Image (cartoon, coloured by chain):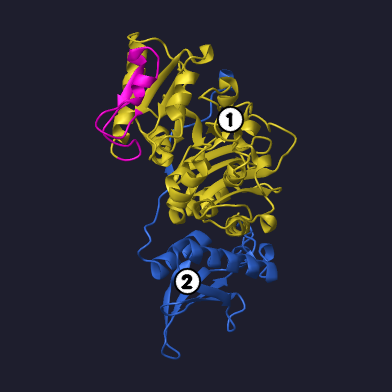
Chain colours: A yellow, B blue
Amino acid sequence: MTTAPVPVVVITGFLGSGKTTLLANLLRDPALARTAVIVNEFGEIGLDHLLVEAADEEIVLLAGGCLCCSVRGDLVRTAGNLLARRAAGAIAPFERIVIETTGLADPAPILQALMTDAGVADALCLESVIATVDAVAGAATLDAHPESVKQAAIADRIVVTKTDLVDPAANGLLERLQALNPAAPRLTAAHGAVDASRLFAGGIPDARGAGVRRWLAAEAVPHDFADHAHDHAAGRHDRAVTTFCLRRNAPLHAVTLTLFLQVLAEHCGARLLRLKGLVDVLESPGRPAVIHGVQHVFHPPAWLDAWPDEDRATRIVVIALGLDPLWLEALLDALDAEVAAHA
Amino acid sequence: MSSKRFGSARRTGARRRPRPAYDSLVQHDPAWHTRIARVLAGALGVWGVAGTVGPDPEEARGFVIVPRAGPALRVSHHPSAGWAVTLRDPAPGAEVALGRHAGLPGLLRRLREVLAPEAAPGHLVIGAPQILPRDAGAR
């Protein structure tokens, strides 16, 4: 019997942005009762885990380093141990793992570890990345710390915290977040309270295509590149991030897709923060491919049984640091023309 | 069957799968030039190389890449042989062939090695499947 992979939610956000308060509130929600938590803290003495109320044996503290750097291996071992203890009946049978990163963490390596590590990659699947942004200090943090921009850009959901103190619409923060990551729904939290059902509604698509549209959110992302300019009140770090959707009505050759991803991985590397797509592949009519990558690491393409909606176009959502959408569009077209010529 | 007839069949390639000429499918028209120039110029930007990309006045299917520092490169496409890269030596008439590549991925790799040798190449890594099985349902 195969066991369904355990969904993993990564909560990221800059120092003091309210991750722990959010998590503490979420864990009081009955819908999240069966949740194991891994808290990563930077420093010798961890405190945040003391603020999270849940069964002790289901909260694991990773102290003394940052998940994206020194304790990445610890994360994998810890997640593996949780799974083993669950299988042995030593702890309650949790249905989800939530990982709270340090405020300084780059989420990309954490996602890559979850995608590739032999110990856990088959047993876990990334459900979503949630980023907290502080309504009071968020704009200044985005200006000063590129890590915070990356955290917000890569997220599937953004929670604007401390809205009981400041209206984030008034100080331009919401506008900046919209430009930075238009595909991510934004929720607001006052005193850490947020609607868990909305926060965890990102979901993982299944083979029938359920949830794909919501997961991809392509319609929220600009695909008319001529008009795509950062004319909002963006800081210099925001301006480095581009989010766009490559849209193509004609099907792509399967080889084109492979070559495209190879070229991106080879040349763009860390600039490619995240790529999600629904691709019409010529050799697979009626069964589109779902692609998902973080930097140079990709899940294998997954084939849906059918298109999830009436739109049959290829849609590839790219979140990148300083990549020109017109370049990627030209590259995709040029590769497909070469493949067609040799087919 | 005479050897003459057999030879005739071989010459005409009657038993071979016809292979379309590159030109018949990819027109080297202005749109092609624009697209390839954009690919090359965009790649320079990704590698952090300051420079320009323009048409090669001596080669209809060619481009000249002029980095701000270092010698220029000529890139040309030949329907049967793919992409050729030539280093344009500052000395008049002296050029060094840097190789041929069947497709754009190889061409871009070669250009990066020449123009941005310090840029570390990445490698595509395929991890575990993400999508849930059919009966799992979307969460």
Task: Say whether mark 1 and mark 2 are on the same chain.
Answer: no
Residue A30 percent across, percent down from the top left: 52, 11
Q: What stretch is highlighted in magenta?
A: A40-69
- In front: A301, or A164? A164
Task: Give x and y (percent) for residue A100.
Answer: 41, 29
- Of the 4 image quadrants, the one containing the N terminus of chain B is bottom right
The image shows residue B58 at horizontal and vertical percentages of: 58, 84
What residue is pinned by disc 2? B50
Q: In percent of the image, x 67 and y 38: which residue is there? A: A285
Foreground tag (2 vs 1):
1
Residue wearing tag 1: A188
Q: How crowded is the residue under tag 2: few (<14 C-alpha within 10 Å), some, or many (20+)?
A: few
Q: Which of A213 and A337 is in front in this view?
A: A213
**Which chain does tag 2 point to?**
B
Three-letter residue code for mark 2: Ala
Q: Can residue B108 be seen in this view?
A: yes
Disc 1 marks a residue whose amino acid type is: Thr
Q: Does the stretch in magenta take in A135? A: no
SS class of the residue under badge 2?
loop
The C terminus of chain B sits in image quarter: top right
Could you give the CA–CA distance between mark 2 and mark 1, rounded to whole angstroms? Answer: 43 Å
Percent of width and height locating residue A184: 59, 37
